[in-house]
Image (spheres, grey):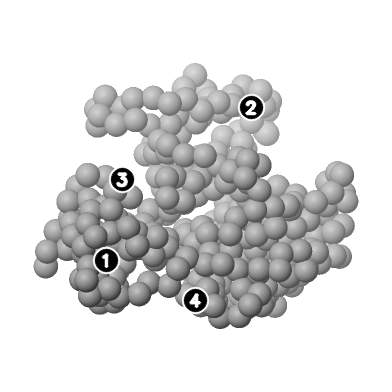
Amino acid sequence: MGVIYQAHDPAIGREVAIKLIRADLIDGDERADYIVRFQREAQAAGRCMHPNIVAIYDFALHDGNPFLAMEFVEGASLADVLRQRGRFPAEEAVAVMLQMLDALACAHALGVVHRDVKPANVLLLPGNRVKMTDFGIARFDSSELTQHGAVIGTPSYMSPEQVRGEEVDARSDLFSAGAVLYEMLRGARAFAGRNATEVAYRLINEDPMDIAMLSGGISPDLVAVLRRALTKTPQGRFNSAHEMAAGLRTVLRWPADRNTDATMLAPKIVATTQRGITPTEIERAERALAQYLGPIARVLVKRSVPGAGSPAALWDKLAEHIEQETHRVIFLQQRDR
């Protein structure tokens, strides 16, 4: 149906991605509707300005075919990463999910429901920085373009109400996010099947295999968050992406020795007066880094402290994870305040 090109914008001097759709393959009224839906992707994503969402620069038609000029992201999809490496350690999976929830919270606050949250629409940059993409089937709360009863999305990650063709809201995206988190923790889909009919039946009628029985290192509280996210009814789920993220942040802060069944987390940071990296300095660096990288800043700081010989060296190591040079300069300026 289309192709994505890497291109160069000479006016701004930056690399971009061009998403071109062959609308000529669609005839009559359906073609016009598809162009409208594609333009809505630009409107939805363009309104959602967030560091964890792929930026949309422009929408236009070329020879009758619609295209988007988007931020060029040098990374791999979460779907590809899962195929290559299998399941994620619990802390790493939670750090990725927190960034996804931050992106969804931004969209939901603007009245945009993504409706197709899945690993293929999550891009991972170095350091597991997240960029969510493809709001092509997102729906504005006030939009009348998506007809009532239309089933839109990827079957294995759809909410039960979405499968049934019912009205959906932000809680549908949270179910899909829960299915993605399950897959990161287990290394297999929560709702697999030989065909769409089998997948749909399981989504509506069956719970996924209990992840606590598959992976002995998953903490009980993380399992509880996952179960709530995958509740069949919207009323039983988290009320918002912020609420789900709050539950996961509690899990992320667990020390490695909380209980014998806990997943091995990054080593707890211990202050070393010899290096001068105090808890206050660690908290300050984490807070500054989070302005650019979001919740994963906590993980990066934990990993960087053991190899840093001084506070200055710690900040230098952390600055390497910030993509834009101007942002790196501002970050390092905060070190000296």
Q: Earlier in the sequence, mark 2 or mark 4?
A: 2
Residue labelled with disc 2: 1
Q: Nearer the viewer, mark 3 or mark 2?
A: 3
What is the number of the mark on residue 285?
1
Res. 225 in view: no
Q: Nearer the viewer, mark 3 or mark 4?
A: 4
Residue 68 image-quadrant placement? top left
Find out whether the residues at labels 3 and 4 contact each other: C-beta distance under 8 Å.
no
Q: Earlier in the sequence, mark 3 or mark 4?
A: 4
Q: Nearer the viewer, mark 2 or mark 4?
A: 4
Label 3 vs label 4: CA separation? Answer: 30 Å
What is the number of the mark on residue 323?
3
| Mark 3: amino acid | Glu
| Mark 2: amino acid | Met
Find out whether the residues at labels 2 and 4 contact each other: C-beta distance under 8 Å.
no
What residue do we see at 45% from left, 68% from top?
267
Q: Earlier in the sequence, mark 1 or mark 2?
A: 2
What residue do we see at 57% from left, 51% from top?
138
Does 240 appear above or below 115? below
Image location of residue 260, percent across then percent down: 63, 77
Q: Nearer the viewer, mark 3 or mark 1?
A: 1
Q: Residue furthest left?
A: 337
Label 3 vs label 2: CA separation? Answer: 32 Å
Label 1 vs label 2: CA separation? Answer: 46 Å
